[in-house]
Amino acid sequence: MTPEALKQLLEYVAQGYLSPIEALNKMRYFDFETVGNYAKIDNHRQLRTGFPEVIWGPGKTPEQIREIMQTMQGRNPVVMATRIEPQVYEELRREMPDLEYYREARICALDGRYRSAEAQSVGVIGILTAGTADISVAEEAAVTASLSGFQVKRLWDVGVAGIHRLLGNWHLISDADVLIVVAGMEGALPSVVAGLADCPVIAVPTSIGYGASFNGLAPLLTMLNSCAAGVGVVNIDNGFGAAILAGQILRVGERLNRKMGQE
């Protein structure tokens, strides 16, 4: 989408040849923006999907991450980079003093306009971990959801080895509209929660566990074989993906409520 093409599109709207909705639909598939010879930024992903593009940190140099983030800044409500180690953050902030770092989640972020009260989305995402060792993956989900404009409630270390810890905090679970349950070892916690909760449960297996957990494969298979209904499973250690899925569920619910209110 060149500036000339955009100008023509806006003129069609002004002249009545296109409705604003038709123009918006055309704008959903604008072209990308190139950074150096190594990245093509999808600036209109938020328009299509509701969430902006997010940078995957591993495999990129600090310089590449910095240039991508600076190019994206101002075009998106939040600019995020995931799986950023502390030493990479220290290099980045030398030229980006406003860069925020969430150490446990290993996420860097610029802007954050979603966090203003007027930009907050409807719904509560509850995030639970089976153990303390699962917190880094859970924090990736929590920070992603918070930066994306959702209210987040955390509940850590409530695994099945001490089920009374879970039941003693049932008020948090009952208040949530979507639950993200993060567990390693045998990965049983999502099934227990889904058997009690009245909302969707997103299960996140982690690579925490002894040898027979096969770096998260054992909890992944447990979650896929859950006998409780209403459990969706994301990939091993994928807290980010769980948060985006939870956000999409809440956004669809919000959209359906608006439609019902118009009828």
Image (cartoon, rainbow, N blue to C red):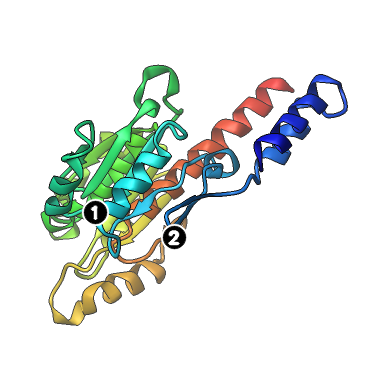
Give left or right: position of 179 versus 5: left
Given the image, on which type of amino acid does mark 1 rest? Answer: Pro
- Badge 2 density bin: few <14, some 14–19, many ≥20, Cα 10 Å: few
Q: Nearer the viewer, mark 1 or mark 2?
A: 2
Q: Residue at x 21, y 48 (%)?
A: 105
Q: Residue at x 35, y 58 (%)?
A: 203
Q: Position of residue 87 (x, y in %)?
A: 12, 53
Q: Position of residue 256 (x, y in %)?
A: 62, 33
- Assign a secondary structure to mark 1: helix
- Assign a secondary structure to mark 2: loop
Q: Position of residue 61 (x, y in %)?
A: 26, 59
Pick out the residue farthest to the bottom.
Answer: 212
- Quarter of the picture holding the C terminus: top right
Asked if residue 35 is positioned above or below residue 69 in the image, the reply reads below
Q: For the residues labelled 1 and 2, say whether their Cβ atoms are less than 8 Å apart.
A: no
Using the image, tell me which numbered label, if any, was put on residue 37.
2
User: Which one is nearer the viewer's eye here, 105 or 126?
Assistant: 105
Residue 156 in sight here: yes
Using the image, tell me which numbered label, if any, was put on residue 130.
none
Given the image, on which type of amino acid does mark 2 rest? Answer: Asn
Q: Earlier in the sequence, mark 1 or mark 2?
A: 2
Asked if residue 126 is positioned above or below residue 188 in the image, the reply reads above
User: Which one is nearer the viewer's eye here, 231 or 140?
Assistant: 140
Q: Position of residue 147 (x, y in %)?
A: 34, 35
Q: Which residue is mark 1?
A: 62
Q: Quadrant of residue 184?
A: bottom left
Whole-Å distance between the Cαs marked 1 and 2? 15 Å
- Badge 1 density bin: few <14, some 14–19, many ≥20, Cα 10 Å: some
Give left or right: position of 97 versus 27: left
- Quarter of the picture holding the N terminus: top right
Pick out the residue farthest to the top.
Answer: 118
